[in-house]
Amino acid sequence: MSPTPYDPTPHLLLTPDDNDAPHRVVRLRELGIGEAPVPEFDDFARKLARVTGAPYAMVNFIDEHRQYFAGLYTPAVDQAVELGRPADPEAGGVGRVMARDHGYCPHVVVRRKALVLEDVCDYPRFAGNPVVDEIGIRSYLGAPLIDRSGMALGTVCVVDQEPRPWGRQGLETIKSMAAELVDQIHRRDGV
């Protein structure tokens, strides 16, 4: 019997278990979010990019299998991106749909806390994420969207292809922007 090869990283790269995903899907359907671009969320992502100075900004909703950017701002495409549009890795493009194991938003949703990664390569748990090699992401700043029911519906986040010193000000900004968007979602819900 040959020895099993040693792999020191499997525990570092796992996407967190998300027991709330089925309930989140129901809540997102009630709100009419997660299946199509929302122009107001695209506007919000544009504002988020402007406020933080980041080239990419997203309003992201997560189900059991994927992430959906109902709001998206990219420097190359200053307009809505079509559902299912594949990312163009050569152009650093980002589409509206991404697998759950890509990126950092699933961690934010499960932890229910903001996440600041000034240089993802400084964090072994996050440095091996597929978005590092496939899109060139080097920094991340995200906060959960927790609605009145107490459920984390998704995130608002910004990313850059360069390390960024987000600092405490970046953390406070992303948290306040998340609260602002939750208020906007509640208005959509009629309350």
Image (spheres, rainbow, N blue to C red):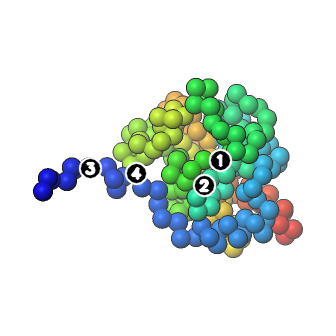
How far apart are the alpha carbons under marks 4 and 3? 11 Å
Q: Quadrant of residue 32?
A: bottom right
The tag earlier along the polypeptide, 2 or 1, is 2
The tag earlier along the polypeptide, 1 or 4, is 4
The tag earlier along the polypeptide, 2 or 4, is 4
Helix, strand or loop status at disc 3: loop
* Location of mark 4 (residue): 13
**Residues under numbered marks 2 and 1 in contact, where contact means CB atoms less than 8 Å apart:** yes
In the shown orientation, is residue 58 left or right of residue 101? right
The tag earlier along the polypeptide, 4 or 3, is 3
Decide: is 25 above or below 82.
Answer: below
- The percent coordinates of residue 137 (x first, y second) are 52, 36
* Location of mark 2 (residue): 66
Q: Residue furthest front?
A: 1
Decide: is 57 above or below 147.
Answer: above
Helix, strand or loop status at disc 2: strand
Q: Amino acid at mark 2?
A: Arg
Residue at the spot 58% in from the left edge and 58% down from the top edge: 65
**Residues under numbered marks 2 and 3 in contact, where contact means CB atoms less than 8 Å apart:** no
Helix, strand or loop status at disc 4: loop
Q: Amino acid at mark 3?
A: Pro
How far apart are the alpha carbons under marks 2 and 1? 7 Å
The tag earlier along the polypeptide, 1 or 3, is 3
* Location of mark 3 (residue): 8
Q: Residues within 10 Å of mark 4 (few under 14, many from 20)?
A: some
* Location of mark 1 (residue): 97
In the rendered view of the protein, which quadrant contains the N terminus? bottom left
Q: Residue furthest right?
A: 190
